[in-house]
Image (spheres, rainbow, N blue to C red):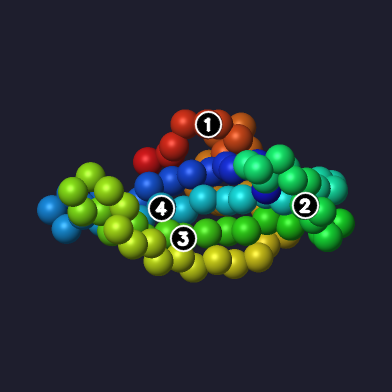
Amino acid sequence: MTRIRDRRFVVLDPERGLALAFVFFDHAGNVPSVTLTDGRAVPIDVSQPWTWEIAELFKIENDRIRRIEAVIERAPYGMASGWSTWEEGLSTEPRR
């Protein structure tokens, strides 16, 4: 993954311990390998760029994430979210 963008938390329910978020993960398709925490380099066999559009529901208990449910859809690389400008989408700040 080369970029995480357009994070948006659309539902926060503290009473039930739920948070629903949308996020886009961009994969540029130009990363030949990754280095694991043990120092080994592992090749990545992906040469085509794409974006994951993800909706995730988090269950939080005692200030810890206990469960995550996700719906993941492959989308065209760099696809706009529709709820923010391109510049806002690249921001590191979560959108509410």
Q: Earlier in the sequence, mark 1 or mark 3?
A: 3
Distance between the Cα atoms at labels 4 and 3? 6 Å
Instruction: Give the residue pinned by disc 3.
Output: 55
Q: Amino acid at mark 2?
A: Val
Tell us which disc is closer to us: 1 or 2. 2
* Picture layout, residue 54 above or below residue 4: below
Query: Residue 20 versus residue 67: which sits nearer the camera?
Result: 67
Q: Tell which circle, 4 or 3, labels the residue nearer the N-terminal end.
A: 4
Alpha-carbon span between mark 4 and mark 2 = 30 Å
Is residue 53 shown to the viewer in this render? yes
Q: SS class of the residue under badge 1?
A: loop
Q: At label 4, which amino acid type do we have?
A: Ala
Quarter of the image where the C terminus is located? top left
Q: CA distance from mark 1 to mark 4?
A: 15 Å
Q: At x 58% / y 51%, what residue is drawn?
A: 24
User: Residue 16: horizontal and vertical position, in percent?
Assistant: 16, 58
Select label 4 or label 2 by which is in front.
2
- Secondary structure of the residue carrying numbered label 4: strand
Does the residue at mark 4 contact the one at mark 3 (Cβ under 8 Å)?
yes
Say which residue label 2 marks.
42
Crowd around label 1: few <14 · some 14–19 · many ≥20 (10 Å)? few
Q: Earlier in the sequence, mark 4 or mark 2?
A: 4
Which three-letter amino acid code belongs to the residue tagged 3?
Ala
> In the drawing, what numbered circle is on residue 92?
1
Please give the name of the residue rendered at 55% of the width and 66% of the height, measured from the top-left corner. Answer: 72
Q: Position of residue 2 (x, y in %)?
A: 70, 43
**Mark 4 sits on what residue?**
21
